[in-house]
Image (cartoon, grey):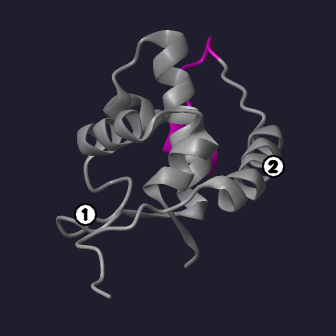
Amino acid sequence: MRAVTSDTAAAVLGVSRRQLDNALSRIGSAAIDIGRQGVSRRIPINRLPVLFLAIELTARTGLPIRRAFQVAAALVAGDFAPGPYLRLEVDLDRIRRIIDERLAVAIETTVTPVRGRPRGK
């Protein structure tokens, strides 16, 4: 499965790395597998539309991110039926196009910081 680093995913989603890490912590392991301490998270590319939509739902409606993630996952899967008098439409094609465009830029511009001690000469 293709995945990107947290830095790249944050750039694609239009949030800071810290905001993304906080959101992922609140969502829990439903979003991505929890990694080891000190190792950058690898976020599957197929999760980016769900995260994008969850962040948008949180910003626009005030839903808590955990609930927004559940709703976003159901919307992306086509399994969301809010009620007989309410209809939600999501332009998934547009979201995927935006993500693809931002991903192309983010992969080229996001640099992973060097970790650990500098090598001796």
The quarter holding residue 79 reads top right
Q: What element carries label 2?
A: helix
The quarter holding residue 103 reads bottom right
At label 2, counting other C-alpha atoms closer than 10 Å, the crowd grade (few under 14, some 14-19, many 20 or more) is few
Quarter of the N terminus within the rendering: bottom right
Read off the magenta span. 72-86
Amino acid marked by disc 1: Ile
Image point 27% across, 85% down: which residue? 120
Q: Name the residue under label 1.
A: 34
Q: Position of residue 107 (x, y in %)?
A: 67, 61
**Is 47 left or right of 95, judged from the image as shown?**
left
Q: Position of residue 68 (x, y in %)?
A: 43, 30
Q: Is the magenta stretch mostly helix, strand or loop?
A: loop
Q: Quick check: 97 above or below 71?
A: below
Which numbered disc, 1 or 2, marks the residue that appears first in the sequence? 1
Image point 67% across, 54% down: which residue? 109
- Look at the image and tell me whether residue 14 can be seen: yes
Q: Residue furthest bottom?
A: 121
Q: Name the residue under label 2.
A: 101
Amino acid marked by disc 2: Glu
Q: Quick check: 117 above or below 88?
A: below
| Discs 1/2, front | 2
For residue 59, the mark is: none
**Is 32 left or right of 100, judged from the image as shown?**
left
* Foreground of the two, 81 or 91: 91
Q: Quick check: 22 above or below 97?
A: above
* Foreground of the two, 38 or 28: 38
**Is 89 left or right of 21, judged from the image as shown?**
right
Q: Position of residue 44 (x, y in %)?
A: 51, 65
* Foreground of the two, 38 or 23: 38
Image point 52% across, 37% down: which residue? 72
- Look at the image and tell me whether residue 79 can be seen: no
